[in-house]
Image (cartoon, grey):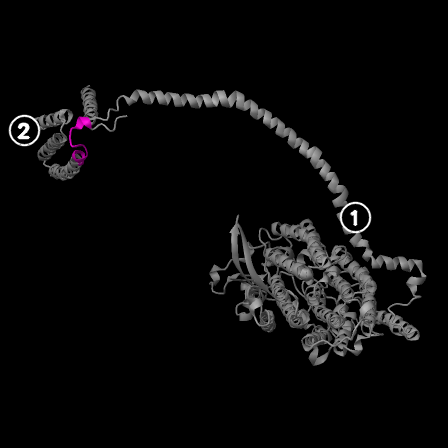
Amino acid sequence: MLLNQFLLLAAVLFCIGVYGVLVRRNGMLVLMSIEIILNAVNINLVAFGALTDNVGGEVFALFAIAVAAAEVGIGLAIVLLMYRNRRSIDLSEADLLKG
Amino acid sequence: MNFLLLAAENATQLPLAVSNGTNWFLEHAWIVPLLPAVSFVIILFFGKRMPRKGAEVGVAAVALAFVFAVLTGVAWINHRDNYTPPAASESALVIDGGEIAPDQVVPAAEEAPTKGEVVTEGGGEAEQPTVAIHKSTTWLRNGGVAFDAGILVDGLSVLMLFMVTLVSLLVHIYSTDYVAGDRRYTHFFAFLSLFTAAMLFFVLSDNILQMIVGWELVGVCSFVLIGHWWEEKANSDAAMKAFITNRVGDIGLLVGVIILFFTAGNGSFDILTINSNIVSGGVSHTALIVAAMSLTAAVMSKSGQFVLHTWLPDAMAGPTPVSALIHAATMVVAGIYMVARLYPVFFEGMQIGGSSINLLAVVGAVTLVLAGLVAFVQSDIKKVLAYSTISQLGYMVMALGVGAWTAAIFHLFTHAFFKACLFLGAGSTSHAVHSFDMKKDMGGLRRWMPHTYLTFVVASLALAGIFPLAGFWSKDEILSGTGGWGLFGGTGGNGAYTFMLAMGILGAALTGAYMTRVIYLTFHGEFRGHGTPHESGRLILVPLYVLAGFALLAGLINLPVGFITGNNSSWQERFGHYVQPVAGYFPDIAQATPSYSLAIVSSFVAFAGIGYAFWYYFVKLDRLARATGESLTELPDGLVANSAVARAGHTLLVQKYYLDHLYTDIIVGTTKGVIARAANWTNQNVIDGAVNLAGRWSVKVGRFTYDRIDQPLVDGLANATGRASNSLGDGFRVVQTGKVQQYAALLFAAAALLGGALVVVLSL
């Protein structure tokens, strides 16, 4: 099996996701980047599950997808509220937690 | 539910044995005190709204209690007669509720010391063990000590149940008329009920702690009832005096109980355990003598023995039914009962057997004569009776002191009836003349009050010990019990108590004489009061007749051995047979045999006392009164008028041996005056000085600590910590930008660093 390719793909996706999270100003895009990170992890899980012939990996990936769906729901709601309150979803403006 | 039933087959086993099949009334004797207790609560809360102001509840409850007591008595007689000692193999067992199989039974040898002497009785029938019924439940447990509450039913307690409920019932009935219209009528009946309940609770106690509770309850009721008319200062003073004097003796009771708990009881308050341990001989004699002497102090206060008796005559300030109930028939015999109940303590502690003098006997003998003498100079009819009560209690204490247990309890029994009758009779006369002063307001009452007169004379004769009334039998039994009578062969007994015998005979003469004086001053001669006296109502007369009937006949239940021969001889000594415990919780006392010569001598002496008083009052004084046409109360040219010595003696008696002066003036006065001032001075100058010095020094030390230690060191440290935290916070504040992405960047950077470090570490 070509585990390396899967891992490489996952690593690339992860990096893309991290990049998106760190540099994008748009809240929607940050959410999407988070989804990419999660899917990178899912690829890893499925790949290792297939390698070790253990169905646990796939099961775990399915759980991760379900949780990600729920999380996106909450994330979108936050973004929506943010837009309603500020007429903008620029994350650089959201710094109310400043100490 | 334990039934500890007692046997004394031999001393190698614990003398506690088992019997099954007891009577319902014996096992449920606690109902008897419960009834008046419930009545107390009902009267207290609802009495005023009832048609008869609560009196009906009190009478009904006590009547029911009396019925129960009678049934209990019948059950006990049955129980005592039918009891057969168990076979030797199972004679020393403790069974719980009669339901436990024999293999669960605790072996006797573990329960108590086994050495000791064989407890047997002289008579053939008496060797049968008396089966006391003991039922108890654990009230609370603390520090490994179980505080039990329970009942101990044997001949003595059954007798007391009968006597207390009977006298109480009659007093209740009498009171419905006597205190009718009183301002605190309901309150009076409530406390009459509580008093009855307390006394019944006391006599059923199965442990000494419970006895203290009953003892104190009785004392409180006495306090309340003596002070029933507290608006007059004399009455509330009398109540206070009764309470405080009793408190002096109560210290003795507490000390005695504590000693018994730790020595004889071995960590238990149980009366049966304490008594059997003492009887089987495992208890130090020194502890016992101290315990016995402490308990004697309690007896001296509660039962009005000499030196601590002064409260009892003053207690006559209470309503007359109270005097009859509390200060004649029941409460004051609590002390006697306590000695009888814990008799092994006294018997072994004071070594009553084989001796000729001991504290208890001396206290009793001295009391009976000195109180009898004071009775001669009292002009208040109730005070004469009060001193007579003290004197008769002296007889009982003396009888217990010389080992004549049955005689003492028998005298307690007969005395309750005739003394209650006398007190109620006195109340009846005062109902007619509204005074208790024989010299000022009475005289010649027999013309108006024939029923009161008749019952009073019968009770007086019984008190004086005239054959064949109740007092004769009991007094004579006490006298022969002293064992001091050597004429025509000894009488047996536990020792040669000759001094006590002499005092007892002297007391018989005094009793006859002062009662003759009372009868003359009250019922004979001319009326000295105001208005026209009248006979009392039926509610007062019926109790008088009932009590007089008992005074007449009660003596016949304990005819001495040998008095009746032939088929009826089973009638003799019935009282002793049923009442005296013969089992292992009772000491091995010797029974005195009756002596005809002693009976004749004591009767002769009593007649001599009556005869002299009769000659003085009925013959000489009466003749002089007729001659002068006045109503006299004493001869103008008698002994007191002529002899200086007699006058001094008279003054001594009138002043009641100056004991009240000793207590109020010398002891209380000194305490209030000199000692209190000295204590105050010490307090102000010595104790306060020390306290002030300590205070000033404390202030100085405190100031130094504050200035030199607290402010610079402790506070400085605390402030420095605060400042350090503050500046650290300011430093870190910069990092908190509030920008999520910056946080995320830091997070990922840190993760990358850690991941790198992990790779480096793993590859090493």
Q: Is residue B362 left or right of residue B19?
A: right
Local packing at callout 2 (Cα closer than 10 Å; few below 14, some 14-19, many 20+) is few
Chain of the residue that carries numbered disc 1 in the rendered image: B
Q: Residue at x 56, y 56 (%)?
A: B109
Q: Whole-Å distance between the Cαs marked 2 and 1?
A: 118 Å
Judging by the rendered image, the residue that carries numbered circle 2 is A2
Judging by the rendered image, the residue that carries numbered circle 1 is B666
Work out whether residue B199 or residue B322 is closer to the camera in this orientation and state it: B322
Which secondary structure class fits the magenta region best? helix
Q: Residue furthest bottom?
A: B567
Provide residue B745's location: percent of width, then percent of height.
19, 24
Q: Is residue B21 left or right of residue B749?
A: right
**Residue B195 painted magenta:** no
Q: Report the magenta residues as a range.
A: A81-93
Q: What kind of element bears circle 1?
A: helix
Chain of the residue that carries numbered disc 2 in the rendered image: A
**Residue A85 painted magenta:** yes
Disc sitting over residue B54 in the figure: none
Work out whether residue B228 or residue B369 is closer to the camera in this orientation and state it: B228
Provide residue B628's location: percent of width, then percent of height.
92, 73
Q: Amino acid at mark 2?
A: Leu
Q: Amino acid at mark 1?
A: Ile
In this rendering, the answer to whether B78 lies above or below B728 is: below
